Amino acid sequence: MATFGRISSTCVTKQAKLRLCMTISRHLSAGVHRAVILQPVVSSCLCKNSIHTKPDCINEVKGQLHHTCLPLPNSQVAINRNYASLYSLGNRFNRSALTGNEPFSTFNISKRFCSSNSSSSDGDDGVSSSGGEQEDVSAETATEEKTTSATNSLLAPITVPDYFPNLPVLTINRNIVFPGFRKLITVTDKDLISLLVRKMELRQPYAGVFLKKDESNNAEVVESLTSELDENGNPELITPDPELITPDPELITPDPELITPTPPPLSNDILEGLVVTPPEMPKVLMVETENIKDLPLTSDTKIKALTAEIVKTIQEILMMNHLYRDQLLSILDKGSVAGDPVFMCDLAAQLLNSVEAKDQQKVLEETDISKRLYLTYELLKIEYDVCKLQRKIVKEVEEKVQKQHREYILREQLKVIKRDLGIEKDDKDALEDKFKERIKDLVVPKHVMEVIDEETNKLSFLDQHSSEFNVTRNYLDWLTNLPWGKYSEENLEIEQAKRGVEEDHYGMEDVKNRILEFIAVSQLKKSTQGKILCFYGPPGVGKTSIARSIAKALNREYYRFSVGGMTDVAEIKGHRRTYVGAMPGKMIQCLKKTKTENPLVLIDEVDKIGKGYQGDPASALLELLDPEQNANFLDHYLDVTVDCSKVLFICTANVTDTIPEPLKDRMEMIDVSGYVAEEKLAIAQKYLVPQAQEHTGITKEGVSISDDAMNTLIKHYCRESGVRNLQKQVEKIYRKAALKMVKENTENIEISTDNLSDYVGKPLFTSDRMYDITPPGVVTGLAWTAMGGATLYIETVLKRALEIGSDKDGAMEVTGNLGKVMQESIQLAYTYAKSYMTQTEPDNNFLQKAQLHLHVPEGATPKDGPSAGCTIVTALLSLTLGRPCRQNLAMTGEVSLTGKVLPVGGIKEKTIAAKRSGITCIILPEENRKDYSDLPDFIKDGVEIHFVENYQQVYDIAFPVDS
C-alpha cells in the first residue's frame, strides 16, 4: 500500500535538480486508493488488472525482462512492500502559495504523495514550501501564489476522482507522510524530471510515493523488482505484455537528442529470422490505482477507549515536545478528532519520530480501524518514553548550564565590586604590577628594559583570551625572572676553599690547584670572573662530583645539565617564540633557577654530544663557551643579549678525541687520571666506608674491614681506574653484613681476606700476568684504555720450519682484533726488524724467509694505536735470536721506520698497570720524561724507569750482554 499525492509546486535548480512540494490528502467517504503494482519497490499492494511501466525498469526475475506491462490475474495477490509502498490517499489537499519572484508553479493536489513529515525550510537550491489558505480546487487547475506558512499543515477537503491516470513512481528512504501532510522532495534523475514536468503540463500533477526497504539505497526510481519482493510476492506472475511496450506519447516526450532514427523497413524474409527487441526507454515506472475502502467503522467501547488514550498520550507528548504544540493542542481540544479514528491514527502516527519506518508502514497498511488504533497506541507509548528520557537529559543539561552561568555572573560581579573598592585590580593591571615588582631591585640593562616596556605596553592592548596574549605574558615572565645584575658573594678565602674541596675528594691535585689559582686571581682583581675548564679522564674518578664540591667551596650556585646524545640546537639556544610550547635554552633556564649571574655550570659528557637534522649542538656551545662572546650570549627565545661572562663553566669528558677541535680550543683541559691501589685504599677508608655505614645504619664498631681485605678487594675485584665499582663492592659488604646481623643477632662482624669471598663472591682477577716468565718471541707492552691502563702481551711464533735452499720470501700473519693504525704499526715494525737484523747480523736471514704469526691476546677486545711499535720489534727480534727478553720488563713507545722512539700518552695509567702486574722495569720515550716527573712519588716507588730516544737503546735494555 502506498500514498498518492498531487504536485503543488516545482522548481528546477542550477544543479539540475527538481524540487517537488507534494501534498497528501486525507480520505473521506470516497475511500482509500491503492496502487496495483509489481516493481522493485513494491510494498503490500493488492494486485488487480495490470501495471503500466516504462521499458527497462524491471530487471531479471528468471532472465532479463524488457517489457512495460505486468498483467495480473483477476484474483487479488498480496505483494509485500520491499522497496516502497503506494500509500493510501484521501481527498484533502493543501495548495502552496509561492512568491511571485520565485520560479515556482503551484499545482493543486487531488491524490496524496507518500513522503516524510518535514517542516518548511529553504533547500540547498533555494526551494521552499509553505502552507497557505485551504480551499477546494479541481485536478486540472494550476495557479501561482505567494508562500506564507510552514509545511506539515493539515489540508482542506477536495473531491477525489474514482480513477487516476498512470502515475510515475517516486521513492523515499524513511519518514512516512500520512494523509493531511506535505513533504518537499528533491528529484535529480533526468528521466523522472522530464516525466514529472510533462505530466504537470498535461494537467496530471499526480505521483505515487513508495517506502524503500533498503534505506541505504538512494535511487529515485525503481531499479530491481524481484530483489525487493518479500516472501508474499510471486515473481512468476510477472510476464510481458506486448501490447503495452510503447508508452503513451502524451505522457512522455523523448529528448530529440536521444531519439534514434527509424531504419528502413525490412523484407518479410529477413523479418522471419529476426527476434524483435523492444526499444530502450527511460527507466521510470508507471502505475495504475484503484479505490480501496477501509473496513466499516463500528462504534464500540474498545475503539472509544483507544481513541481517548491516544488523545491523552498525544497531549502528554506535546507537553514535552514544543514542536507544533499550540496548533495540534487546539485541534485536539475541539473534540472533532476523537470522533474520527482514521484521522486520529494518521495524526498520531505522523508525530512519531523515534520509531522505525516499517512500524509506521504497518499503521498505514492496516484497514481494520481497531487494529490500527492499537498499533498506533503502542507506537505512541514508545514515543512517550523516548520524550521522557529526552526531557530528563535536557533538564539535567539545562541545570548544569544554568549553574555554570550563574557562577560566572557572580564571579564577574565580584570582580567588579573588588575593583571598585580597590581590593583587587584588573588581570592586566595585576600582571603589569607583578612584572614591575620583579625588576624593581634589579639592574636591568637598558636594551632589555626597552623590550620589557614595549611588551608590557603591547600586553595592555591584547585580549586576554587570544593566543598572542599568552605568548607575550610568558615572554615577559621569563624576562623578569632572570637575575639581572644579581651575583652571589664568592668565597675568596683560599684555605677555606681548600678545606672544602679536600673534604669530599682525595688526590686530584691538578684540579684542586687550578681552583685555588682561580680564587687567587679573583681575590687580586677584587671581582668575580668566569672561566671554562674541562676535566677529562676515565669513568668513576670523580669528575662530576668534584664540580659540586668546587661550587660549594666557592659559594656559587650549582647547575648541571648533560649534553650526551643531544642533537637539537634549541636545547642550548632555545626555540623561537612563534612556536607552540617554545621555551629558552638550558643556559637561560640555569640563570632563572639559580637566581644569580655567576653560578657554576657543569656541562657533562661533552665528548658524547650528538649531531642531527636539527643542527649541531657542539657548534652552539662555541658561542656559550667562548670568553670573547659569552658576554653577549643571544638566546633564540629571549632575543636579547645576556651576560654569561661571570659564569664558571666546567665540562667533563672521558676522551678528548671526539671533542671538536674548535670547542676543545676554547676550554682549559685538565687531566683527571685514574687512581692507583694506594689512592683507592685511602678513598675507601676515608669516604666510601663512612658513606656505606650511613646508608645501612651500621656503626663503626659494628663492621670492620681490615686493610688486607680492602687491598684484596681492590686488586682482585676492582681493577678499574675509578672507584665507582669499589663503592658498589663496599656497599655490598655492608648490606650482607646487615642481613647477617639481623638474622644471627650479631653485634660485631670482622671482614678479612679469609671471609671476604663470603660477602663479594669469587675474585674476578686471579692473576695480573699471563706469563710469569716470558719465552722467546713474547714481550710485555703497556696500553691505555678509557677504564685505565693495562698490560698487553705481543706473541710471535714460527708457522713452519725453514726450508734449506728455498727462495721463498718470508711473510707474517696478524690476528687479535686490531685496528687500522695498529696494523700499520705492525707492518712498520716488521720492516724495521728486518732492517735492524740486516745491519747487525747480515748472515741471519730468518725474518727474510720465515713464515711468522703475530697475535695480541684477548681477541674479543678491540685494540688500536701506535704505542706498541717498540714492543712488536722487540718480540720479532726475540724470536729471531731465540733469546727471551729481560724478565719483569714492559715498554711503550711508537717506533719510526728509521728506529726513532716517539712519545705516547697515558703514562700514568700505564705505569700504574705495570706496577699492578708486578713489573719492575719500564721503558718510556725520552719525550715522556716530563709526564713521568709529574707522577706522585708513591707511583714511582719500586719501579726502574729507562727513557730512550732510539730503538738501539731499547735493544740494549731488553737484551743485556751479561744475560
Image (cartoon, rainbow, N blue to C red):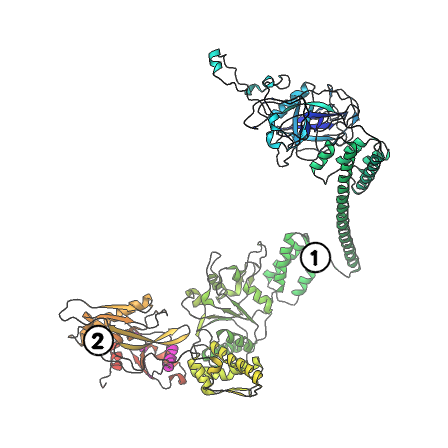
Tell which of 584 and 943 is nearer to you.
Answer: 943
Q: Quadrant of residue 871?
A: bottom left
Q: Callout 2 environment at 10 Å: few (<14), some (14 to 19), or many (20+)?
A: many
* Residue picked out by circle 2: 880
Identify the element where label 1 is drawn.
Answer: helix
Q: Residue furthest right?
A: 334
| Count of all numbered marks drawn on residues in the image | 2
Q: In percent of the image, x 47 and y 16: which residue is there?
A: 273
Mark 1, Cα crowd under 10 Å, few <14 / some 14-19 / many 20+, is some
Residue 410 painted magenta: no
State left or right for residue 348 relative to residue 667: right
Residue 732 coordinates in the image, percent (x, y): 51, 79
Please report the bounds of the magenta region as a residue range: 900-926
Residue in the foreground of this view, choosing between 713 and 609: 713
Magenta residue check for 910:
yes
Q: At numbered mark 2, what does the secondary structure look like: helix, strand or loop?
A: helix
Q: Name the amino acid type tagged 2.
A: Thr
> Is 949 above or below relative to 279?
below
- Tell me what residue is drawn at x 48 percent, y 58 percent: 615
